């Protein structure tokens, strides 16, 4: 069921389906909750599934000139609390993983497990921060051109041609975002401090889903981070870039479902 809540005077859109323990799915940069449609249809038999449009994405409004991870995590918390849910497993793709970790760090008692879907706990390097500034300037000058180029680069380039339909759908989703919303997300990611300290100290189980051909997040770096939590699980995918929910949907869905079930059973 599609729903909307007010958060800081703005609309935050989400969908709730299914029944059982609560699994929260957060999309990445330039995406929307609709990317999870195929997953949530399979998961709702075992879980209450909450898919949320993060601020400035999908049908959720822009909240600020910069969407910090804290601000987005607070919006996610407002949705969860509006549904009367007390504990969750939270999964995030890419930027959504940054938000998921922020939420877990700030609300540890509510979180039974975290799934980092092509995501990590580090802050941006100085080079990455500079790159985001350059990207902001590109968006200001040519938003449409940026979107058309950015999306295909997320896939394993050896197989990108077979995902033409999916790429067009993602480009359509991203094209609905304003420049203001895109820049707010880029600014928030650039300013984030990271959650490596939390990852090292937490007792919350963490699953890392990693693509060996991910050009955005080198798998060797993610494997190092996966050693930090006291309880971590790794799904390492060959022939997969940054988009495992499209490039390897069956195995990623199964892994996430089984992980969430184990987290709630403990």
Image (cartoon, rainbow, N blue to C red):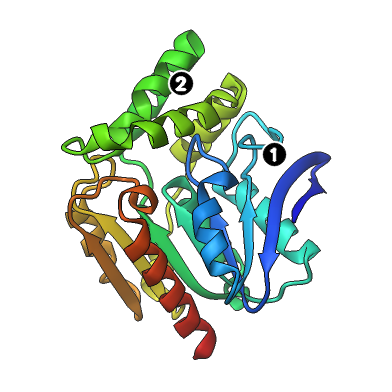
The image position of residue 153, as x and y in percent, is: 29, 31
Q: Residue at x 68, y 33 (%)?
A: 62
The image position of residue 73, as x and y in percent, is: 61, 54
Compared with residue 148, is residue 75 higher up or lower down, i.e. above or below? below
Q: Is 147 placed left or right of 155 in the picture?
A: right
Name the residue beneath numbered marker 1.
Answer: 60
Q: Nearer the viewer, residue 62 or 21?
A: 21
* Quadrant in the picture for the N terminus: bottom right
**Label 2 packing within 10 angstroms: few (<14), some (14-19), many (20+):** many
The image position of residue 218, as x and y in percent, is: 21, 48
Q: Residue at x 40, y 21 (%)?
A: 148
Q: Residue at x 36, y 71 (%)?
A: 200
Compared with residue 164, is residue 264 higher up or lower down, i.e. above or below? below
Compared with residue 171, is residue 92 higher up or lower down, i.e. above or below? below
**Which label is found at residue 256?**
none
Q: Spot the residue most to the top.
A: 141
Q: Nearer the viewer, residue 66 or 43?
A: 43
Q: Residue at x 42, y 77 (%)?
A: 258
Q: Is residue 102 visible?
A: no
Q: Gap between marks 2 and 1, in whole Å?
A: 21 Å
The image position of residue 21, as x and y in percent, is: 62, 78
**Label 1 packing within 10 angstroms: few (<14), some (14-19), many (20+):** many
Q: Is 222 placed left or right of 6 in the picture?
A: left
- Dot 2 or dot 1: first in sequence order is 1
Name the residue beneath numbered marker 2.
Answer: 136
Task: Identify the secondary structure beneath mark 2.
Answer: helix
Q: Is 260 placed left or right of 135 in the picture?
A: right
Q: Is residue 138 visible?
A: yes
Q: Spot the residue most to the bottom.
A: 266
Task: Identify the secondary structure beneath mark 1.
Answer: loop
* The quarter of the displayed image where residue 214 is located: top left
The reply to whether callout 2 and callout 1 are in contact (CB within 8 Å) is no
């Amino acid at each position: 069921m599609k729903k909307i809540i007010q958060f800081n005077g703005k609309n935050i859109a989400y969908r709730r389906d299914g029944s059982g323990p609560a699994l929260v799915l957060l999309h990445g940069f330039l995406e929307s909750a609709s990317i999870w449609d195929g997953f949530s249809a399979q998961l709702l038999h075992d879980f209450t599934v909450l898919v949320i449009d993060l601020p400035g994405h999908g049908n959720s409004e822009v909240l600020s000139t910069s969407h910090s991870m804290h601000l987005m995590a607070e919006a996610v918390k407002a949705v969860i609390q509006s549904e009367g849910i007390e504990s969750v497993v939270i999964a995030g793709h890419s930027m959504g993983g940054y938000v998921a970790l922020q939420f877990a760090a700030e609300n540890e008692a509510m979180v039974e497990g975290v799934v980092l879907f092509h995501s990590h706990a580090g802050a941006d390097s100085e080079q990455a921060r500079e790159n985001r500034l350059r990207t902001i300037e590109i968006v200001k000058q040519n938003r449409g051109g940026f979107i058309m180029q950015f999306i295909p680069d997320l896939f394993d380039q050896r197989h990108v041609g077979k995902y033409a339909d999916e790429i067009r759908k993602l480009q359509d989703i991203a094209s609905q975002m304003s420049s203001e919303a895109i820049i707010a997300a880029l600014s928030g990611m650039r300013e984030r401090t990271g959650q490596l300290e939390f990852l090292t100290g937490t007792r919350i189980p963490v699953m890392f889903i990693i693509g060996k051909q991910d050009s955005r997040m080198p798998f060797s770096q993610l494997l190092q981070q996966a050693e930090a939590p006291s309880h971590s699980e790794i799904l390492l995918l060959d022939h997969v870039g940054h988009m495992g929910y499209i490039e390897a949907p069956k195995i990623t869905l199964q892994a996430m479902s089984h992980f969430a079930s184990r987290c709630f059973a403990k």
